[in-house]
């Protein structure tokens, strides 16, 4: 055993570059694999993690505070099947406005649920603060994370003030914190005294956890048992954790296809590189194996030395790689947790254990196979085999390329180099191919997501969306002001828009919920009081509607079974209207959306006759915020501005794409670096001879670089169509998860100059990775190279 330890120390000391290469490759591959596996694991179940950690409520019951006593509510906590309960918490539904610094001005919030709680903890529904503190006095509020983060430019943070516009005196609440409830029990939390200050509480919340709540039927049965235990008419409404879970799953689903794609690419690259690096290192040490056998080492001892020389740097690499993966995952998972409105997550422990063990086992197997083969050789065979590839390997390629007079001889020698080790060349080709495919796929997917964000952002460039105070309420709700006041406000707005020099043209927008005869539930109907084709709604298929027509989203088509060209019937206020579907609009989500002309649906929803928003197209060169400020000065009642965004999901996905692409490129580069190092080490005698006969350092660099350059160029050219095909295959999966198709512009994101650059990605990876060993070879003196052989 002492001899093995001595040989191991000598091998590690004499082959520091080899040990460093093994450690770096396993570090990068383990980091990439751990990060991808961790993100994928958390993408599948962030809500479940948060729900368990925060003791989420299986059911949220809203009860009539005037019909039930605290004693009766407390008694429901002892019902069979109830494992925990908390409440009652006084509840109020309010409307509010807030001025967002640097944003679109006044932002309106409709139908906000406020709950009165003295503390964030409890047996059910722990409220997790991400910033600030819990209210300590009236006039303070903690807002939910989804309310606080409305997208770029529209966010609430501690210190900002919210005005409750629908309450007497319009009380103001200062935001003192941002928090998360696993089951969205409220939009904001205040002290119980704050709810009382708004008036006698009409409703209260009760939160329950049940023994069995894994299905809708089980939750419904438990809620029914609570209803029976309370006086008739007490329960005003009930919410299930399964509904929130389904909504979160809908948010998460689009990330799974591309995470799986990067994970598979990363796994493929990792396996290939680890096998190539480790087996190449053992093969490169075959001559030393012969020496060890010559001094009396047994085959088992030889194998132990070979495997341990790989195991030591491999253990270091996988440990450091796991640590780096967790460090990288912290900000990424923090961003995704904000997107999915759950508490911050981390890479699951089983991933931190399974991936490093798998990488280490892979390295051990990759070392054991060639080591056992070398261990069976005699000392003479091992010494002669370990000098370099046999002369017959690549000899024909060298002879053929030597006749190519248009290329310098060092270049032709380099081009013939891959044929000496065809197996290693094939693995290197696959590694570069995977890396270049990841680049092509990542660039295309990133561009597609940027276009998705632009398509979802309404109003677009050169447009603003304005509304009168109090006219942006929930669909179908009667205006809070008398009709005469509303009419006067509309006249003021119209006059201001026409008088403002920057106005190019405008159109009104009204929203409502109407029934559809071929669909359960209602559809969200947006009605425009004129031509709205210029607003910028992207179409997946068909064309903008005309008289008697409408455009609908993918969810509407899926829910009704209709297609573009079919007719459907909207119902409301005892009337109906039949419209023709002229196009499919890009609007993701489970909710059915209909866009049509106001004249087609005005009779179905009286509230739709009152404009809620005004889309205004600005003349070229007009500053949008300056225009809005000018309009505000013209209107005595004020004006609100709205900015639609794609939300925080797309930036989070873009960040994941960038990080994973860079990791895969790094891993691929390390694989090429290892190949170049092995080829240079194996041909150190040839390098000495070349230098002795006058090869310059520049020629040596050219020879070493061209050894992998051709492989990289070919891999890059193949990777472009493969990456595009992968992009076109993954996008529909992401779209299906988001309940939408995509316009053609989301797919057609590659332009000819970009394709040329992407085709060179493999060459860039290969050349950049080979420069370091090429420089080492160029600096080595002829005598040193010959002695090192």
Image (cartoon, grey):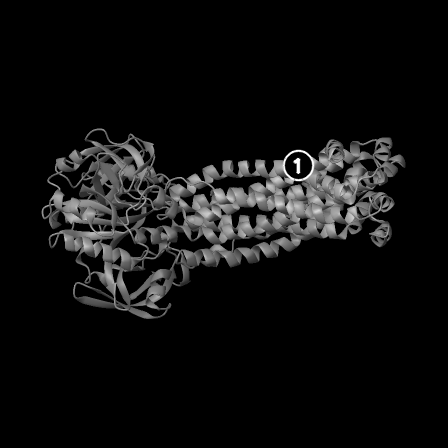
In this image, 79 relative to 153: left or right? left
In this image, 294 relative to 97: left or right? right
Q: Position of residue 9 (x, y in %)?
A: 73, 32
Q: Position of residue 630 (x, y in %)?
A: 28, 37
Q: Nearer the viewer, residue 320 or 341?
A: 320
Q: Position of residue 257 (x, y in %)?
A: 48, 54
Mark 1 lies on residue: 312
Q: Tag 1, which secondary structure?
A: helix
Q: Which residue is situated farthest in the right direction here?
A: 693
Quadrant of the rendered image containing residue 232 = bottom left
Q: Position of residue 762 (x, y in %)?
A: 66, 48
Q: Which residue is situated farthest in the bottom direction here?
A: 566
Q: Nearer the viewer, residue 372 or 425?
A: 372
Can residue 67 be seen in this snapshot? Answer: yes
Q: Quadrant of the C terminus?
A: top right
Quadrant of the rendered image containing residue 32 = top right
Quadrant of the rendered image containing residue 470 = top left
């Amino acid at each position: 055993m002492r001899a093995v330890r001595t040989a191991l120390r000598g091998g590690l000391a004499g082959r520091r570059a080899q040990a460093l290469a093994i450690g770096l490759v396993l570090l990068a591959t383990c980091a990439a694999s751990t990060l991808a596996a961790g993100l994928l694991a958390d993408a599948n179940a962030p809500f479940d993690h948060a729900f368990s950690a925060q003791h989420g409520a299986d059911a949220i019951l809203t009860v009539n505070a005037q019909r039930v006593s605290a004693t009766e509510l407390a008694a429901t906590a002892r019902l069979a099947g109830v494992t925990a309960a908390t409440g009652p918490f006084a509840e109020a539904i309010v409307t509010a406005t807030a001025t967002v610094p640097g944003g679109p001005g006044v932002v309106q919030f409709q139908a906000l649920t406020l709950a009165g709680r003295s503390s964030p903890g409890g047996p059910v529904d722990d409220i997790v603060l991400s910033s600030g503190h819990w209210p300590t006095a009236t006039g303070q509020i903690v807002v939910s994370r989804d309310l606080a983060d409305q997208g770029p430019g529209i966010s609430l943070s501690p210190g900002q003030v919210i005005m409750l516009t629908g309450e007497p005196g319009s009380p103001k609440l200062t935001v003192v914190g941002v928090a998360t409830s696993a089951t969205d029990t409220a939009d904001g939390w205040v002290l119980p005294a704050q709810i009382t200050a708004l008036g006698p509480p009409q409703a209260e919340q009760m939160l329950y956890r049940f023994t069995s709540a894994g299905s809708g039927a089980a939750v419904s049965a438990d809620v029914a048992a609570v209803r029976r235990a309370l006086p008739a008419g007490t329960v005003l409404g009930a919410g299930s954790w399964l509904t929130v879970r389904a909504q979160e799953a809908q948010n998460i689903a689009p990330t799974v296809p591309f995470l799986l794609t990067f994970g598979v690419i990363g796994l493929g690259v990792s396996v290939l590189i680890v096998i190539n690096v480790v087996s190449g290192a053992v093969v490169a040490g075959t001559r030393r194996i012969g020496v060890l056998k010559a001094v009396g080492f047994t085959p088992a001892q030889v194998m132990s030395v070979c495997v341990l020389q790989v195991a030591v740097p491999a253990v270091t690499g996988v440990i450091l790689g796991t640590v780096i993966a967790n460090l990288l995952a912290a900000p990424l998972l923090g961003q995704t947790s904000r997107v999915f409105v759950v508490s911050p997550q981390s890479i699951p422990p089983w991933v931190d254990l399974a991936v490093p063990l798998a990488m280490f086992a892979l390295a051990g197997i990759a070392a054991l196979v060639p080591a056992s083969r070398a261990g069976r050789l005699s000392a003479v065979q091992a010494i002669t085999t370990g000098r370099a590839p046999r002369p017959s390997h690549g000899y024909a390629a060298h002879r053929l390329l030597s006749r190519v007079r248009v290329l310098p001889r060092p270049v032709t020698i380099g081009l013939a180099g891959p044929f000496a080790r065809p197996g290693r060349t094939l693995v290197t080709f696959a590694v570069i191919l995977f890396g270049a495919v990841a680049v092509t796929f990542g660039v295309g997917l990133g561009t597609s997501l940027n276009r998705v964000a632009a398509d979802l952002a309404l109003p677009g460039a050169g447009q603003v969306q304005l509304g009168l105070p109090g006219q942006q309420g929930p669909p179908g709700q009667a205006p809070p002001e008398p009709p005469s006041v509303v009419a006067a406000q509309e006249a003021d707005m119209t006059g201001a828009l026409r008088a403002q020099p920057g106005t190019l043209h405008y159109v009104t927008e009204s929203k409502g919920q109407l029934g559809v005869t071929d669909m359960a539930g209602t559809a969200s109907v947006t009605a425009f009081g004129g031509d709205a084709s210029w607003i910028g709604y992207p179409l997946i298929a068909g064309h903008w509607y005309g008289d008697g027509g409408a455009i609908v989203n993918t969810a509407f088509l899926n829910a009704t079974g209709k297609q573009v060209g079919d007719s459907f019937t909207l119902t409301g206020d005892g009337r109906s209207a039949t419209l023709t579907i002229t196009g499919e609009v890009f609007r993701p989500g489970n909710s059915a959306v209909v866009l049509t002309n106001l004249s087609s649906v005005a009779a179905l929803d009286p509230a739709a006759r009152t404009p809620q928003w005004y889309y205004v197209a600005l003349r070229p060169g007009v500053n949008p915020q300056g225009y809005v400020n000018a309009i505000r000065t013209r209107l005595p009642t004020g004006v609100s501005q709205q900015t639609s965004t794609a939300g925080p999901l797309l930036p989070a996905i873009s960040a994941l794409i960038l990080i994973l692409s860079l990791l895969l490129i790094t891993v691929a580069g390390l694989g090429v670096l290892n190949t170049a190092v092995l080829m240079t080490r194996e041909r150190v005698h040839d390098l000495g001879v070349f230098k002795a006969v006058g090869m310059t350092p520049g020629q040596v660099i050219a020879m070493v670089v061209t050894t992998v350059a051709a492989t990289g160029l070919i891999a890059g050219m193949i990777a472009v169509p493969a990456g595009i095909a992968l992009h076109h295959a993954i996008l529909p999966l992401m779209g299906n998860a988001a309940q939408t198709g995509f316009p053609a512009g989301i797919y057609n994101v590659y332009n000819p100059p970009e394709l040329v650059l992407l085709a060179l990605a493999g060459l860039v990876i290969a050349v950049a990775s080979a420069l370091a060993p090429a420089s080492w070879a160029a600096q080595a003196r002829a005598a040193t190279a010959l002695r090192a052989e």
